[in-house]
Amino acid sequence: MKKYDENVVLAIVLLLSMVLVAVDLLTTRDAHAEYGDVVINKYSEAAGMRPVVFPHWFHRVRFRCKVCHADLGFKFEAGGNEINMLKIIDGEYCGACHDGDLAWSVENCDLCHSGAPGTPTQVHESTLQKLVAPTGGKATE
Amino acid sequence: MSIVKNLITPAATVIAVFILLLFLVNKESHSADPNQFNRLMAPPSKRNPPPTEDGIHDGPGASMLQTPKSAFGTLPKSKSGNYIDWVKALDEKKIQPRYDRNDPEVQPIVMDLNIVHEVKGSMPNVVYPHKQHTEWLDCSNCHPAIFVPQKGANNITMASILLGEKCGVCHGKVAFPVSECRRCHSQKKKQSAGAKAAAK
């Protein structure tokens, strides 16, 4: 056998094992988020930002559902609202509160855009999510 | 030059074999234990995970977020969902969520009206309480889009709830999960006519 053949075989074996390990690590990383956390990723990743994660538990300690779902017009559907940054800085949706007065303002991009890349729009730990994939959705598809 | 090459090749082979072995051992460890508990269920240690470990957060913001456990300490517990009984938390004034975005003094318009739905079969009847709902929600959140405001006018079934319709719009997503059957199925059935007749 010629020398370079050995190296090629070796390189392939090395690469293959690395790919296998990488795939294994990624696919076994189950998401088991807090109940009611909503990932919103209609526009974020396409625009180069991490997805948005909205924690229901944190907000419902401070506000009744009515404040957001009646007064501010958030529909009961993950991804069902056409939210973007222009509306937010104009005081709609998250911007009604995240205005530097009631809550910290929009320049804290990383606090809202804190989602793991590749996480699709969905509400976490829902009945449907758990019935379809009993251990919870995957962090990566 | 050739000495280096001669050393690199075996070293790399050893590394490659080692990585492959690691992979195999790793695979083995999450498939082979016949005594494994919590195969399809999150174990108690994984409940209320901190954002940095929940599989959906990433990046510099994640570590700045509050962990649910640090906030839930004194709140009354439940068996699923956030593992918090939000109805009790509110009743006991452990939390005081605002009804108006800006004014903490505004009080909710609470309506105390129970609607009882008799359930076919063995399960206790469903008592739908307006009180606990209007503490949190506005009439317009349910009427008329989710429910026509008329007793019995809505064809509610367990199947539709599990699919995220009717009561399942909120229960199983944000309000307590469907697994807590007895919080909805809370009224003991009256002995049915048939059973009474049989008892005589």
Image (cartoon, rainbow, N blue to C red):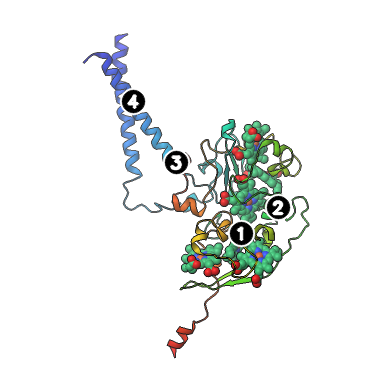
Q: Is residue B27 visible?
A: yes
Residue at the location (36% across, 44% down)?
Answer: B30
Q: Amino acid at mark 2?
A: Val
Q: Is residue A103 left or right of residue A43?
A: right
Q: Which of pointers 1 and 2 indicates the residue nearer the eye? A: 1
Q: Amino acid at mark 3?
A: Arg
Q: Same chain for the residues at labels 1 and 4, yes or no? A: no
User: In whole angstroms, how far apart are the C-alphas of marks 4 and 3?
Assistant: 23 Å
User: Residue under circle 3?
Assistant: A29
The answer to whether residue B90 is above or below residue B115 is: above
Q: Is residue A81 left or right of residue B4?
A: right
Whichever of labels 2 and 4 marks the residue nearer the N terminus, that label is 4
User: Residue under circle 2?
Assistant: A67
User: Residue under circle 1?
Assistant: B146
Q: Residue A22 shows which numbered tag? A: none
Whichever of labels 2 and 3 marks the residue nearer the N terminus, that label is 3
Whichever of labels 4 and 3 marks the residue nearer the N terminus, that label is 4
User: Residue under circle 4?
Assistant: A14
User: In whole angstroms, how far apart are the C-alphas of marks 2 and 3?
Assistant: 35 Å
